[in-house]
Structure formats: C-alpha cells, structure tokens
Image: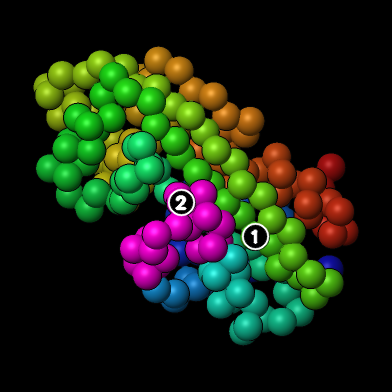
Amino acid sequence: MPPLVLASSSRYRRALLARLGLPFAWEAPEIDEEASERSALPPRAIAEQLAERKARAVAARHPQAVVIGSDQLAHLDGELLGKPGSAAAAEQQLARLAGREHELVTAVCVLHPQGAERATVVARLRMRALDAASIARYVAADQPLDCAGSYKLEQRGIALFERIACEDHTAIVGLPLLWLSGTLIRLGFPLP
C-alpha cells in the first residue's frame, strides 16, 4: 500500500480519518489560505481550490503517497464566516446566524500517483433563534474558536440548530468519510 498522508493540521480531520483504522501521517500544507479567501470566487470554488492546493503542497513532498487535502468554510449569503479566534468574535458570528440558514461547504481532494479524486459536500443549516445569554453559555461550554461558523455540532452545538440538511454528517466536522471511504477502497486500501 502507498503511504496515506493527510494534508492538514486540523485535529478534527485527524480524528475523523483515524476512525477508518488505516495508518496515516499528517503534515501542515503551509499554503496562504487568505489569498483564496480574498478572491472574488464563490464560497464553493474557494473551498475546492484550497482543498486541492493543500493536497498538492503535501504531495510535492510525498509523490508516491495518497494525499488527502480538505477545506471547509461557512458562509451566510455568500459572505465567508472564518474561524472566530476569540469568544467575542464567536458570539458575534452566532448572533448573525441565529434564526437564519447558512451553508457549510466541505471540499476534499485526494491525490494519488494515477491522478486525483474530488468531492464537495454542502450542508444547509438553520439555526434556532438565540438570545445573547444562550450564545454566551454555548461559547463558554464548547469554545468553538477554531471552527468556521463558531459551532461544534459534534458537541453541544447540535442544540443550536433546528434543521440540518447534509448527505454526510462527517463532512460537517471536516472530512466526508462516506465519500472518502469509497475512494480509498477503490484505490486498494483495506477497508471493510
């Protein structure tokens, strides 16, 4: 089997990939994500471009490996919602999202010696109406400071939502395992 490398420094993506039980390494792709985010491209195209750029950056160092690059972004009416970085910024993002629907776009690119495989999963999420006290309690509990959209659905953040439409809920956490599992099986990795 060729080596499997995750082009990411995300602990969430590492934990998701580990669920498949395959040995893998991970490396930070060290690309300038802000240049793509400042472009005039629509959110889906930005996520797809970043996923491929991440995979290509790491594949250049591991040409015989199967390299997985992924990117995720949240947007509200086309405006990107980045990782908040602070509790105050998370509370502001959640106040903007409260009572509204937004999209969470997760793109993945798998590079291998024979070519590339790509997928994009778009989740549509409708948040409940929330007051400032509820938002502050949530941010204090989950600390979603490194999450696009300022929530963690895999923790208490699930209670923030009244509706989620998504073909693969692992994509919401950062890596679409349904698609990725099928792709790795087709590439010869020993999954059940």
Determine the main secondary structure of the stretch shown in magenta.
helix
129 with respect to 115 (left or right): left
The amino acid type, in three-letter code, at marker 2 is: Pro
Q: Residue at x 38, y 26 (%)?
A: 101
Residue 103 is situated, as x and y percent measured from the top left of the image, at: 44, 35
Residue 44 in the magenta stretch? The answer is yes
Describe the element under mark 1 as helix, strand or loop: strand
The amino acid type, in three-letter code, at marker 1 is: Cys
Q: How is the image coloured?
A: rainbow
Q: Residue at x 79, y 46 (%)?
A: 182
Residue wearing tag 1: 109
Crowding around mark 2 (Cα neighbors within 10 Å: few <14, some 14 to 19, many 20+) is few
46 with respect to 113 (left or right): left
User: Of 35 and 135, which appears nearest the observer?
Assistant: 35
46 with respect to 87 (left or right): right
* Distance CA(mark 1)–CA(mark 2): 18 Å
Crowding around mark 1 (Cα neighbors within 10 Å: few <14, some 14 to 19, many 20+) is many
Residue wearing tag 2: 42
Does residue 14 show up? no
Residue 72 is situated, as x and y percent measured from the top left of the image, at: 47, 50
Residue 57 in the magenta stretch? The answer is no
User: Of 21 and 96, which appears nearest the observer?
Assistant: 96
User: Of 24 and 100, which appears nearest the observer?
Assistant: 100
The answer to whether 140 is drawn above or below residue 107 in the figure is above
Residue range highlighted in magenta: 33-51
Q: Residue at x 39, y 32 (%)?
A: 102
The image quadrant of residue 156 is top left
Q: Which is more N-terminal, label 2 or label 1?
A: 2
Residue 142 is situated, as x and y percent measured from the top left of the image, at: 29, 35
